[in-house]
Amino acid sequence: MKGNVSFIEALSILSKSSPFAVSTENSGQKSSLLNEIKEYLYIQSPVEEKVLSTISSLSTQNKKILFLCGSSGDGKSEILTRCKKTFDSRVRFHLDATHSFDPNENAIQTLDREIESYLLGDTPLVIGINTGMLANYAEEGANENVAQSIKAYLDRQSYSDEFIFINFEDFPKFLIGDNEYHAEFPEKFLKRITQQKDNILRQLYDRDKANKNDVDSKRLFANYELLSLPSVQAVIIDLLFKARLKKDQFLTARALLDFVFGLLAGPGYLFDNLFSGGDNELAEKIAEFDPANLRTKQIDRFILAFELKLTDSDFEDFREALMNIDINNVKKAHSYLRLFYALRYGNYANNYHAKFRSDFSESLIEKYIHCYKLHRDFNGDKAERELLKNFYNKTLIQAVRKHINRNAPYLSKNQYLTAEVNGYLLTSKLDIKPDYKSIQNDKPQSASYFNVHLKVKVNDSEVKIRPIPLNINLLGLLIEIVSGFRPNKHDKSSIVILDELVDDITKVANQSHDIQVVRGRKRFELRKVEDDDIEVSEV
C-alpha cells in the first residue's frame, strides 16, 4: 500500500485544500493509507474528552441538547464525526449547524427542524455550531425556549439544565504554567508528525529519501529534518504563542495543520517558509515577526559582510555543515538570519548561529509572563505584594502619569494634569496605588490578558478604578512610555485602552478639593474649605 503513496502526497492531508481536511460521514474507511495516516496524526484534545464524557451520560431518560460551540476550523466536525461512530444508535447528531444541506431551507430553518424532531422524540441531540450562528439562532430561531437559553448562555446568565454548552474557547491552546507556558496540542502534534518510531510518515520519508534526488524533494527532506529538531519545534511554538498574544490570533486545528504543511512543502526552506506569509491565517500573522527585519549592530554587520562576500571562516564552516541535511544554495543574508532564529534554542555544527541569540531576545514576552503570573498567583503574600507594587509603581502608574502629563512633564510626582485653559494648567494631587484586594479576587481567565486594578486617594477617600485588561501590546506601550517614547500610530488599540484608563482617573481627579493652577514658574493652589469657600495661595 505504501508504494502507491509518496511522502509529499501523505503530507498533503494536512493542507486545508485536501479532501481530508474536514471529516464528514462520507470521508471513507480506514482502509486507505491516507486515512491511516490521518488517524495516526489525530490527537485527542481536552475538549473532545469533555464531549465524549458528556455524550456518554445522555440517554432517553436524560434527554438533553448538547451544543458544541466554537469557530470555523477548530475541529468540531472531526470530534462529532468520531462520536457519531460510537453513539449514533442512541444520540442524534447535527454535525454542522452552519449549513442547511437543503436548497429550500436556510441554516436557521434546518436547526429549527432538528430541534422540533428532538422535542417530538426521545433521543438526545448533539449540535456542532459556530458561535456566530449560535447568536443568530438566539435572535431568529423559532423555538423560544431554546433561543432564550442560548441568549442566556451568551450573556453568561443562568439557563435551563436541558441544554449543555461546550465551547472551544473554554479550552485554551496556551496555558501559562509556573515557569513557562505550555501549548499541549501543537507540541504533541509536532512531536507526532516527526517522531522516529512507529511513524508512517517517517517510513515514507525514509523510503523516498533513498530513491529521490531532485531539487524539490531534497528541499522537502531538509525541511522535515529541520522540523524534527526539538529546538526548531520550540521556536515554532514560540511564534504561535506570540501570534496569540500580540495579534490575538486563535489557533485552530485546521489552521495549524495547513500551516505545518506550508512549512514543509512551501517553495523555500522551512526557515523562509516560516515567515513568507500566504493565505494561511497563522502564517500571515507570523510573517510580521520576521527576524530578518530586526536591526542590531551584529545583524547589520552580518548582512554587510554577506553582501560583500567577506564572511568569516566560522560562517563558512557552518554553511558547509548545513549541506549534511541538504541545505545549500541559500543566496540571501535574510534567509540565513531566519535560519539562525529557527536554530536559536539548540546546537548545530560549530554553533555559529548562537552568536545572534541575544539579538533575537523575546524580553517583552518574558516580562508579560512574569506580570501575568504575579496577578494570577497573588494571594496576599508580602513578598508577592512587593513584586506587584514594583510593577504598578514603576511601569503602570509611571506610564499613566507620563501620558497624562505629556504636555507638562515638569509637574511633580503626585500632580496630574486635568485641563488646559488659556495657557493655564489645572492639576490635581492624586495618590494612585494598586488595589491588592481586587487583584487577589480577579484571576486571569485567558493567557492573552490579565486585569490591572488601581485605586485613587482623593479628598481623604479612596475610589476604585474599573479594571483594565492588559495584554502584551499594552504592556509594551507602557514600557515605551516609561522609557520616554511617545505612542505611535501602530499602537492604536493599546492607546484606546490606555486613554480609557486615563479618562477614568481624570474623572476622579476632577473631584479633588486641592487644585493647582500652573503658568510658567508661577503656581497657585486652590483649596476647597468650609461652606464651599475656596482658599487661594501662591506655592
Image (spheres, rainbow, N blue to C red):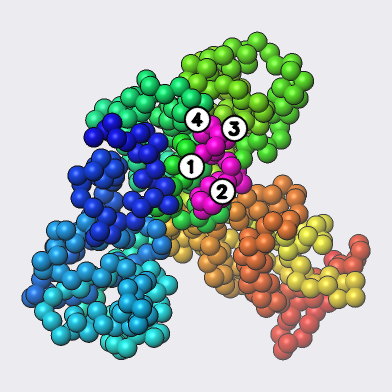
- Is residue 100 rendered to the left or right of residue 364? left
Badge 1 is on which residue?
262
Sequence order check: which comes first, mark 2 or mark 1? 1
Image height of 463 relative to 146, above or below: above
Label 2 and label 3: CA atoms lie apart by 17 Å
Highlighted magenta segment, given as a residue range: 266-289
Q: Which mark is residue 216?
A: 4
Q: Nearer the viewer, residue 333 or 239?
A: 333
Identified by mark 1, the residue type is: Gly
Residues at discs 2 and 1 in contact (Cβ within 8 Å): yes
Secondary element at tag 2: loop
Depth check, mark 2 against mark 4: the one in front is: 4
Q: Quadrant of the C terminus?
A: bottom right
Badge 2 is on which residue?
278
Label 2 and label 4: CA atoms lie apart by 19 Å
| Identity of the residue drawn at 39% across and 74% down | 133
- Is residue 18 rendered to the left or right of residue 56? right
Label 1 and label 4: CA atoms lie apart by 14 Å
Task: Find residue 145 and report its horizontal and vertical position in percent.
Answer: 28, 87
Q: Residues within 10 Å of mark 4 (few under 14, many from 20)?
A: some
